Amino acid sequence: MFDVLLTEAEKKLRDEVRFFVRDKVDPDLLIAMDSKEKEYPYEFIKAAAEADLLGLRFPKEYGGRELDWVSEIIALEEVGVLGIALGCAYSLPSIVGEAIDKFGSEYQKKEYLKPTLSGEKICGEGLTEPRGGSDFFGTITVAVHRDDNYILNGEKRFVAGGVGADYFIVYAKTDFDAPPHKSLSAFLVDRDAGVDVEEEYELMGCRGMGAARIVMENTEIPEENLVGEINGGTDIFNAMMVPERITSAAGPIGMGRAALEIAVRYSNKREAFGRPIRRFEGISFKVADCATELDAARGLVYRAAKAADTGKWCRKEVSMAKAYATEAGFKAVHEAMQILGGIGYTDVYPIERLYRDARLASIWTGSNEVQRLIIQNEVFNEILDEDKSLKRDIELDTPGAHKTEEKVYTEPADKYMPD
């Protein structure tokens, strides 16, 4: 962590979360989750709520602390050292809470947001379907208005808390004639309203979070559980993608940092050929590269957090942070395992668990390929839409700048065809 960029209040929060992670999270919980003996980390959520660490950005009247996004990602990196599962559990109140806080009614804030931040209710989100995840707007789950309810039919896949959550935010198609971006609505769906678990997944990592496929068949949702406006799901989804992707970026930095710290301590003690292996550039340069890339990732994540705090459009910054930080975090875990060698591939060290966890980060919350699609689109738009007269025209700084006939961008296919 680069302290030079943190205020005293931010350093204090970092230490608060760091001590919580050190003192209040039993290793047995992590082991039970990873060995599939634990379906959901209820006690972790309770402990975080009691420590007043859930939903740091939200209003105090609902259980938050009215902090900013920078504070949230500082906390997330510290929680990230525990692995992706507890990082996910910690993030979900912030992600689902974003929709309720920004678009929800007062009833929804009191009945859902407040008990979520107090640890009384566990939330989940239903975005991905068996037909796909990153193609979100192709959703085929539907909701039909009938009397004072919406009748929901469909299924969602890879739902963290599919086993364990008390309620879910679920997106469904409500206008069957509108284009995809204008056809969806968001609902708060209680488990006991008729949410069935059809499959609990056996995952490579991120275990103990009850990841499941949930099915809703003629599930009745009261009108008051519609979040925001009917057919207004796109705005809610876009708002949720900020916490979804920033938290997905911050957590892997914590995982990478934890693995790198283990590797540094190990390589300082482990000897080969008569000296500590840290004395070999093959080892020490890995440490240098990973430390540099983790700090670069922090810079991108902090920038995205600052941008999010302005309330302005920050899709590029968030996608850059998500893509780069998840890959930097995974690389650090990968190189840490390489430094430890065979023993790193065993459960003597937690690196093999972190490796399995970190692999997920570039897949979920919008694959990194989708993030790059977003980034390139934003960059092209920014550069092509800007007023060139406000900057130096660098294209003129060359002797051949006047040779406009050589600046050929396209030519007609029939240019040299005979008449």
Image (cartoon, rainbow, N blue to C red):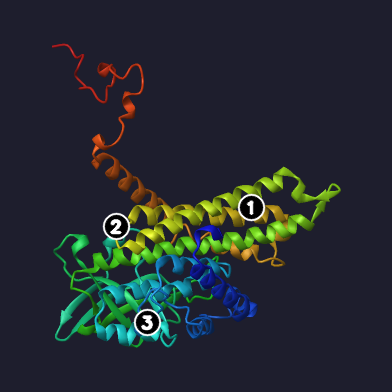
Q: Quadrant of the N terminus?
A: bottom right
Residue closest to the eye, 287 or 299 = 299
Left or right of residue 344: residue 117: left
Total residue callouts: 3
- Dot 2 or dot 1: first in sequence order is 2
Distance between the Cα atoms at labels 1 and 3? Answer: 42 Å
Residue drawn at x 20%, y 81% as measured from the top left: 150
Residue, far front: 8
- Residue carrying label 2: 313
Left or right of residue 127: residue 44: right
Numbered circle sitting on residue 335: 1
Under tag 3, what secondary structure?
helix
Residue drawn at x 39%, y 73% as measured from the top left: 57
Numbered circle sitting on residue 60: 3
Q: In which quarter of the image is residue 415?
A: top left
Residue 70 shows in the view? yes
Q: In this view, does 30 lie above or below 309?
A: below
